[in-house]
Amino acid sequence: EIVLTQSPATLSLSPGERATLSCGASQSVSSSYLAWYQQKPGLAPRLLIYDASSRATGIPDRFSGSGSGTDFTLTISRLEPEDFAVYYCQQYGSSPTFGGGTKVEIK
Amino acid sequence: QVTLRESGPALVKPTQTLTLTCTFSGFSLSTSGMCVSWIRQPPGKALEWLARIDWDDDKYYSTSLKTRLTISKDTSKNQVVLTMTNMDPVDTATYYCARIQAAGATTLWFDPWGQGTLVTVSS
């Protein structure tokens, strides 16, 4: 089973700043088989990015994904107030797994 | 528009069996390629994939929980049912269902998700 490790656990930033979130895999992830989700308190996760770099429908272009192999990144170019949330990466597979999450909080 | 909604008991006792229902609309599980999964999230913790059922009744389970899980579907009612036996307090979590994109046995991404239902295991 592939283990995903997200860092940092918490990111304290101000609106307008750039956020860079990392997701590391314990072994190489096939063919950029990785997704990113945003979760706000009390709500279900929402798909942001699939196939490592493709934005889901309706996701603003300030969100971008990159990476391959064992190292993936989610970048939020300029944080909006509604972007403060927890972000999870997930690898595809017959037994998909999620990372532990990164909380983006207001500094 | 695709929507999913989970339902089931909010409280179960240790050793009991949990039965959760996912009722969905906007797609049919009799359509080729459609798949639904269950995922859970203990309070304040990360997400954990549990099970998946496909349009052709193929089923997949979490390795660590497969002895306790059963997933089934009722296509006529647009429902997917998950049962988990021998519940324990560590199974306290919000349980979500989600439609998934799949490529054969490979689960791709989860979208959309239901709102989730909190299940507490306590005597």
Image: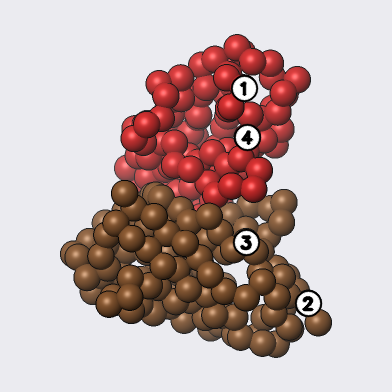
Tell me the residue that label 1 is attached to: A81
Horizontal and vertical percent position of residue B39: 52, 61
Can residue A1 be spotted in the picture?
no
**Horizontal side of residue A36 vs B36, given as left or right:** right
Query: What residue is at 58 percent from the left and 27 percent from the top?
Result: A83
Q: Are marks 3 and 4 on the same chain?
A: no
Check disc 3 and give the amino acid type. Answer: Thr
Horizontal and vertical percent position of residue B68: 56, 82
Q: Is residue A83 above or below residue B52?
A: above
Tell me the residue that label 2 is attached to: B122
Whole-angstrom CA distance, mark 1 to mark 4, is 10 Å
The answer to which quarter of the image holds residue B107 is bottom left
Q: Are marks 1 and 4 on the same chain?
A: yes
How packed is label 1: few (under 14 Cα within 10 Å), some, or many (20 or more)? Answer: few
Query: Mark 4 and mark 3 in contact (Cβ < 8 Å)?
Result: no
Query: Mark 2 and mark 4 in contact (Cβ < 8 Å)?
Result: no
Q: Viewer-proximal residue, B54 or A34? A: B54
Whole-angstrom CA distance, mark 1 to mark 2, is 38 Å
Query: Mark 2 and mark 3 in contact (Cβ < 8 Å)?
Result: no
Check disc 1 and give the amino acid type. Answer: Pro
Horizontal and vertical percent position of residue B5: 47, 62
Horizontal and vertical percent position of residue A24: 55, 39
Point out which mark residue B56 bears.
Answer: none
Mark 2: secondary structure: loop
Whole-angstrom CA distance, mark 3 to mark 2, is 15 Å
Can residue B99 be spotted in the picture?
yes
Check disc 4 and give the amino acid type. Answer: Ala
